[in-house]
Amino acid sequence: MAKEYDVIIVGGGIIGSALLYTISTYTDVKSVLLLEKYKDVALLNSNSASNSQTLHWGDVETNYSIEKARDTKEASERVLKFTSKLPKSERDLDIQACQKMVLGVGDFEVGRVESIFTDKFRELFPGAKKIGKDELERIEPNVMKGRDPKEKVQAILSDAGYMVNFNALAHSLVKRAAENKDVKIDVMFNSNVTKIVERESDNSVFVNGDEYKARFVDVAAGTYSLFFAREMGYASNLSALEVGGNFYWSPKVLNGKVYRVQIGGIPFAAVHGDPDITNPNITRFGPTVSMAMRLERYNPGTRMAFMKTIEFDSATLASFKKIFLGDSDVRRILKNNLVYMMPVVGKEQFLKNEVQSIVPSLKGSELHFAKGVGGIRPQVVDEKKMSLVLGESKIPGRHNLIFNVTPSPGATSCLSIALEDAIKVAKLLDVEFKKDKYEKELGPIRSK
């Protein structure tokens, strides 16, 4: 006989963990089941080795609109409020403050930095400030060391820089969810979901032949979310490019995060330099861009599942042609990154074109490929609009079912994504959403 729950969450990454915490803490549901394919939470793309460990704030992301920046700042503030209540030893594992800036090099990038520093930007980020060569030399000396003195340089220094171990944060969210004794919470690891069946009255999730029923199913399975949606007949107009990224490391050469100017409309364009929350003695540079052709970076057995996230028809091919061939910036990025994948010459070109724009004096002997580092994020393509979908995507089901597809800044947005779903769960299941408690603990809920 199938076990029954109010809510089943498929996927135990940072989004699934935030869903578990938010739904169990701020709604009156009585039972929640979290299903995770692997032996622990957040072992794939939420793992600290799989991402840049950044709590995005919206102030150094130069391809964001003001509204997107506002949403991102709000999402980050929720993470800060949650972690502020943790014991210091646990909080320090999850999140640490660090210096952060966006760096413009050359006429175009400096012009872009100048153009985003508007009155609306300053109103939203009153603590951010523009800095020039003298201050850069003081706070990030290696950014200026060895640089051509004639080269134009301009930066925006953030007052809200943080690095996050999203694996540790996921553990904290699950732990706090389990402290609520009024809700039955089950977490099952090594639970590979093979099928989801949608019905008007309830939904069934099958794991290794066993059936679990729920009044609401929330699929937060990262690269697998679109796979499940398409398996169930949804999102026929969407395909997913699984964007993989490699990183390189050097001995510590930066005091904080140094982001580059991002090209508008391209979510994966800019290489940046970052500290590592798990190793204070290094700086990481990346990510490079590659099309992974699989759903898990280091699992070639997921290629067939990846093929099911793409409809190889005329609309798909026309969309890819327009995206990859119709935009000169995309063509340049892909061309460069194909070179970066090549042995020997790839590292040399990556150093010359990307890393030395941030740290001009860094030598090739100091730059090392980070083996086993880097993950995959699903970059959704809308074939009707023939364009990339920027930001998070939600695919609603017909009967109490939702699929979360979370490209950048998905991990940062974990509690905001969970808030939106928790409100929907409460409404559909006719239970209370504890708005007053939520706003007291995690901040105001802004109407959109």
Image (tube, grey):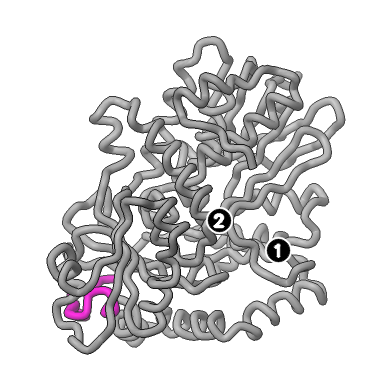
Which is more toward the observer, 329 or 129? 129
In the image as oriented, which residue stretches furthest toward the front? 119
Disc number for residue 411: none
Query: How far across and how far down the image is residue 316, in percent?
Result: 76, 72
Query: How far across and how far down the image is residue 377, in percent?
Result: 53, 58
Q: Quadrant of residue 140?
A: bottom left
Name the residue that disc number 2 marks.
407
Disc 1 crowd rating (10 Å Cα; few below 14, some 14-19, many 20+) is many
Q: Quadrant of residue 354?
A: bottom left
Mark closest to the chain's N terminus, 1 or 2: 1
Left or right: 179 as drawn, with respect to 391? left
Tag 2: amino acid: Pro
Classify 112 as above or below 404: below
Query: How far across and how far down the image is residue 133, in percent?
Result: 20, 74
Which is more toward the observer, 353 or 65? 65
Task: Quarter of the image for the N terminus: give it.
Answer: top right
Tag 1: amino acid: Ser
Classify 101 as above or below 447: below
Classify 176 as above or below 284: above
Q: Residue at 57% across / 37% down in the picture?
A: 446
Disc number for residue 239: 1
Left or right: 411 as drawn, with respect to 156? right
Q: Which residues are magenta?
A: 356-368
